Amino acid sequence: RKEVEQDPGPFNVPEGATVAFNCTYSNSASQSFFWYRQDCRKEPKLLMSVYSSGNEDGRFTAQLNRASQYISLLIRDSKLSDSATYLCVVNMGHTGTASKLTFGTGTRLQVTL
Amino acid sequence: EAGVAQSPRYKIIEKRQSVAFWCNPISGHATLYWYQQILGQGPKLLIQFQNNGVVDDSQLPKDRFSAERLKGVDSTLKIQPAKLEDSAVYLCASSLAGLSVSEQFFGPGTRLTVL
């Protein structure tokens, strides 16, 4: 089983749609979780951290379910500019120690007119 | 604020040749990472430095890959000799500290093609 698993997609959605991505991770001791965004032929950039209570940043909502070892990202009112690959990232390191990020393969989103 | 710098941006070599990549992290960032990203996959950590010391190199193929961070600032990653399967984008990232909550900032990467 992969340490971090994501559906690679692609997800093709029309502008204005709501889309959700899921991710599962294997290490129950993982401490912190993130979503990174990667545009085509560009470097990954942090989109948002994922907190246990769930968190929202504008049109983006991230949820964490530790019991099921499951992370989600919801994008509302999709824009053309949201087209990118979304990487689920899990820190396998321990709190207060060196970060050890493990990336999923990414889910590709294509928003169309 | 200047981001993470990497060079070269592109490199094409033949198998069994050697290649080196350079990274300059964001000023003041103590932790530096090298990742390998193969097409269609997420980045995979190769090595992590805290200042000039190695924190994690468990996934670095040490028979052909080496990395150093002299003086705790710039870093170089070398492949010698290269194999076809080394074709990938090599990403350098840095963070203020290596702790679990520190955001990692990535450079633009070096795209390596091994023929």
Image (cartoon, helix red, strand yellow):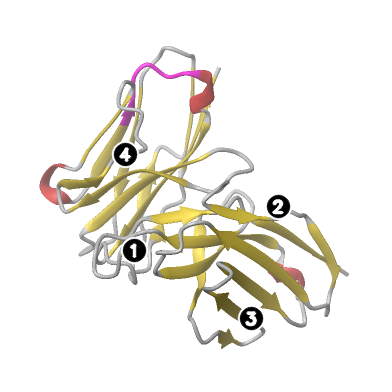
Residue beneath disc 2 = A8
Find numbered disc 2 in the image and state the secondary structure of the residue it sits on. loop
Above-or-below relation of A67 to A37 = below
- The CA distance from mark 3 to mark 2 is 19 Å
User: Looking at this rendering, what residue extends furthest in the top direction?
Assistant: B16
Q: Is residue A38 magenta?
A: no
Q: Earlier in the sequence, mark 3 or mark 2?
A: 2
Would residue B10 be found to the left or right of residue B62 on screen?
Answer: right
Range shown magenta: B78-83
- The CA distance from mark 2 to mark 4 is 26 Å
Mark 1: amino acid: Ala
* Chain containing mark 2: A
> Which of the numbered marks, if any, corresponds to residue B58?
4
- The CA distance from mark 4 to mark 1 is 30 Å
When asked about the image quadrant of residue A54, the answer is bottom right
Label 3: few (<14), some (14–19) or many (≥20) C-alpha neighbours in 10 Å = some
Q: Nearer the viewer, mark 2 or mark 4?
A: 4
